[in-house]
Amino acid sequence: MNVIGCQSMYAPLRRVLLKHPRQAFLNQGSLDQQWQSLNYHGCPDFENAVREYDRFVELLNQFKPQIHFAPAAENTGLDSLYVHDPLVITERGVILGNMGKSARLSEPFAAGKYLAELGLPLLGRITGNGRLESGDLLWLDERSLALGQGFRSNAEGLRQLRELLGDLVDEILPVSLPYWTGPQDCLHLLSLISIVDQDLAVVYSPLLPVPFRERLLERGFQLLEVPDAEFETLGCNVLAVGPRQCIMLNGNPQTLLRLEQAGAEVWTITGDEICLKGTGGPTSLTRPILRSAS
């Protein structure tokens, strides 16, 4: 089996990077000091966050991936809990992003250093004026990649990514993201869509660009619509641990029902402290390193 490779959103999860609240949040004092400047919706309670996260890890362990826990790192803050964003994982190695949120600029280097210690190869990094966060990357299949362009990822980041990927991809599709509530909030492409099988995606269509939505339909995707109220509670942020096997936040009953009606198995977690206040769902909490059918 390969040790690295994640050019899929839904292939079985074999190896994954996490960062525990004990290493990201550190303690209640750190939360009290940082949450407002990072535009959280409220101050997380540290002990409850630890309990929520431990239950999330217990659920992930049921699927038997190899789990790596990133250590605490100097100059990283609360947002480093959301390990998905700083790194792009390809069949040939790790690409370090360049964060659009200035408070997160050190995260790619901290996470990359840890993955290098695990022996994973570095393919490259996004530099200069390029901005790229992995929350804007959506693998439509193993050779096709959509990249959201908004406040967190830009055209120069896309250009550099295309150069680094080379013949690993056949197509990179730019997707223009809406202004929504402005630069202070986090709206990634993965805020609007989660692919949970080769032909099934959970979407929030009111914010999806029409050409991109039409492209999804042309590719044969069935689109499960997230209601307005459940978009606010991160109903669109669904982590596939395998084809049609999903983890999502509880409190999104209509989205859950639509997934089950489409033949998906769904497990739910509580994320009042680790997800809703920082607007990062189960996908954001995980950086898959290896997805593979075998």
Image: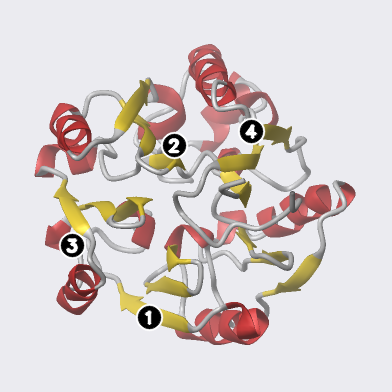
What is the CA distance from the residue labelled 3 to the residue labelled 1? 15 Å
Residue 71 position by quadrant: top right
As measured in the structure, the alpha-carbon distance from the residue carrying label 2 to the one carrying label 4 is 15 Å
Q: Which of marks 3 and 1 is in front?
A: 1
Which numbered marker is on residue 282?
2
Q: Is residue 167 left or right of residue 260?
A: right
- Residue 85: which quarter of the image? bottom right
The residue carrying pointer 4 sits among few (fewer than 14), some (14 to 19) or many (20 or more) residues within 10 Å by Cα, namely some
Q: Mark 1: few, some, or many residues within 10 Å (few <14, many ≥20)?
A: some
Q: Distance between the residues labelled 2 and 3?
A: 20 Å
Which comes before the other along the chain, label 1 or label 4? Answer: 4
> Mark 2 Cα within 10 Å, few/some/many (few <14, many 20+)?
many
Disc 3 to disc 4, C-alpha distance: 33 Å
Give the image location of residue 282, x and y in percent.
44, 36
Q: Which of 111 and 179 is in front in this view?
A: 111
Report if residue 46 is visible in the image.
Answer: no
Q: Name the residue under label 1.
A: 174
Q: Which of marks 2 and 4 is nearer the N terminus?
A: 4
Answer with the quarter of the image where residue 183 lies.
Answer: bottom left
Q: Is mark 1 on a helix, strand or loop?
A: strand
Of tags 3 and 4, the one toward the viewer is 4
Which residue: 37% across, 20% down? 270
| Label 3 vs 4, first from the N-terminus | 4
Q: What element carries label 2?
A: loop
For the point 62% across and 66% down, the residue is 97
Q: Name the residue under label 3.
A: 207
Q: Which of 221 and 274 is in front in this view?
A: 221
Query: In the drawing, what numbered circle is on residue 65?
Result: 4
Q: What amino acid type should be assigned to the residue bearing mark 1?
A: Pro
Residue 221, numbered label: none
Q: Is mark 4 on a helix, strand or loop?
A: loop
